[in-house]
Image: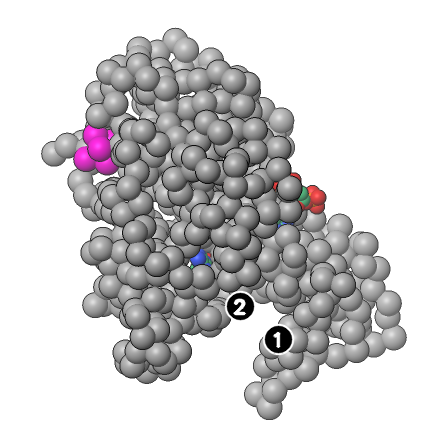
Amino acid sequence: MANVLYDSLFGIHHQKTSPFLHLPDGGSVSYQAFLEQAAQLAHVMSGFGLKPGDRVAMQVEKSAQALALYAACVQAGLVFLPLNTGYTVAELQYFISNSGAGLVVCDGANQDALQAMVADLGAQLATLNADGSGSLMDLAAQQPVQFETVARGADDLAAFLYTSGTTGRSKGAMLTQANLLSNAQTLAQHWRFTDKDVLLHALPIFHSHGLFVACNVSLIAGAQMIFLPRLDVDQLITRMPQATCLMGVPTFYTRLLADPRFDRDLTAHMRLFISGSAPLLADTHTAFEARTGHRILERYGMTETNMNTSNPYDGERRAGTVGFALPGVDAIVTDPDTGVELQQGEIGMVEVRGPNVFKGYWQMPEKTAAELRSNGFFITGDLGRIDEDGYLHIVGRNKDLIISGGYNIYPKEVESLLDDQPGVLETAVIGVPHPDLGEAALGLIVPAEGQTPDLEALMQAANVQLARYKLPRKLCVIDMLPRNTMGKVQKNLLRDQYADSFNS
Ligand code: MCA
Ligand code: AMP
């Protein structure tokens, strides 16, 4: 048995001395140097006693070394578990404990805060800092630069990505070698990636978009990446002349459009702009074309499924749609109550099936069974319709989810915390339009009778437990929450009422 994911993404580049990553300081890392470092890291992890199938959790800033840790996990047959750098200790504790991670790699600045908790959970801790220093790399430097790749089958796990839900705790989506590989192959072909491409990479690498879509597609094509730590419009504009492609969430495109330097001349040589993770407004699509002459290619995916649909490369990229099912993927629209497939044009639940669809949620068979049908279709929770030309339109969500700048915020998680604070009777957290983030969280607080909750204290309490991106951007005190006859909070009414909260 081989390790087809390793061989296809990394192994093919072993002898390549050409650049793979271009770094913010102007330096670069060749494919060969990158893979040698990955091999050293694979040795370090074997030295820690990790065995194929064990989980490696990583909460670090984006760097070439962090990406090499991903390659090392694939090579050593370990399950890679990247975590948002914004997560608090309380959030991390859950992910480490639930996944049973054997090794946690964190930034040196967080070592003291995490050490005891990680040890209590029976895991080992190593550090990796944004500049590539830390105990992990110190150990790696002493290791051989070749590592015998561990054999893995198509159905073996390659990664866990945690995704929250409308109820209960976060779920570890189990992604197999075949899930990642099939999507990388399909996307690279569909979007015509080659070794002539240079991808401008400014997304985080702890989500599917920045890691699997952007990096795997570049790797499989043998392309180069300009690897920037975060979205910084100045940097994007400065580096764009060396790039051929950009992938981003819609906020990337609205911020670029807000800069007058971003124009037709700057982008004339670019081959492709891709958007996803959140709806791209048709207005942004149109404004982008008017400014640059390029039509953004929008695609649609999920943590559990990688990418499902894409607008065409050659055909019409239709604004406000996410295109067609990718080759090998089925996308259908069903009645949310009965699961029966609907007629073209009708709005219903989007369901997807294909080699990209995950294996299930880690140690949560009931949640897996509730969302993944026995016939292989995954119930996305997105509402959509397929138009007369076959383009899929995502028209809403059948799940209580806010997508803010491409990050998911599950209102229930925030509401439960706010509900427990002094002076609060109940709360509703809703997503309302935001000019920069697409959607932002607004917290509506109903005080307990005769009390005046301290809004600042509420935010502080939430801040201790939750990553900052989940915190409502604004809190408003209101008298009561509107409810329907079943007693359910009518968030649609609240969303309408507060629609202008961030636009005025
Ligand atoms: C940062 N903050 C946010 C967000 N990002 N708040 C709400 N929503 C956000 N998206 C908060 C920080 O906690 C901080 O709070 C303050 O904003 C400034 O942080 P900074 O890092 O400077 O923010 P930024 O540079 O403005 O970042 C905005 C961003 C970034 C560029 C849109 O969030 C981003 O790169 N998003 C991409 C997310 C992504 O990759 N999603 C893919 C998911 P404070 O000031 O209080 O400390 S994968 C997926 O969805 C599927 C598979 C798919 O289809 O792709
Ligand atoms: P995540 O759980 O982070 O993987 O987020 C997946 C969700 O992002 C999907 O279920 C959709 O609701 C949303 N999403 C991703 N891409 C798009 C898109 N192009 N248009 C609209 N929604 C999208």
Where residue 81 appears, x then y in whole percent?
41, 40
Vertical position of residue 424 compared to residue 218: above or below = below
Residue kind at label 2, given as amino acid type = Asp
What residue is pinned by disc 2?
Answer: 400
Residues at discs 1 and 2 in contact (Cβ within 8 Å): yes
With respect to residue 99, does 326 lie above or below? below
Viewer-side residue, 25 vs 420: 25
Give the quarter of the image for residue 482.
bottom right
Question: Percent x, y for residue 285?
Answer: 50, 56
User: In this orientation, which residue lies closer to the viewer: 81 or 313?
Assistant: 313
Quarter containing the N terminus: top left
Q: Is residue 402 above or below residue 490?
A: above
Residue flagged by tag 1: what amino acid is it?
A: Lys
Secondary structure that dominates the magenta span: helix
Q: Position of residue 383 (x, y in %)?
A: 42, 71
Q: Earlier in the sequence, mark 1 or mark 2?
A: 2
Residue at the outermost left position: 1
Residue 244 spot, x, y in % from top left: 41, 34
Badge count: 2
Magenta stretch contains residue 262: no
Residue 102, numbered circle: none
**Which residue is nearer to you in this view: 233 or 150?**
233
Q: Residue at x 68, y 70 (%)?
A: 499
Residue position for label 1: 491
Bin the neighbour count of mark 1 within 10 Å (Cα to Cα): few under 14, some 14-19, many 20 and up. some
Residue range (magenta) = 4-8
Beta carbon at label 2 within 8 Å of ligand 2:
no
Which residue is at 22% across, 55% downward?
327
Side of 369 relative to 260 (left or right): left
- Relative to 473, is 268 on the left or the right? left
Q: Is residue 394 visible?
A: yes
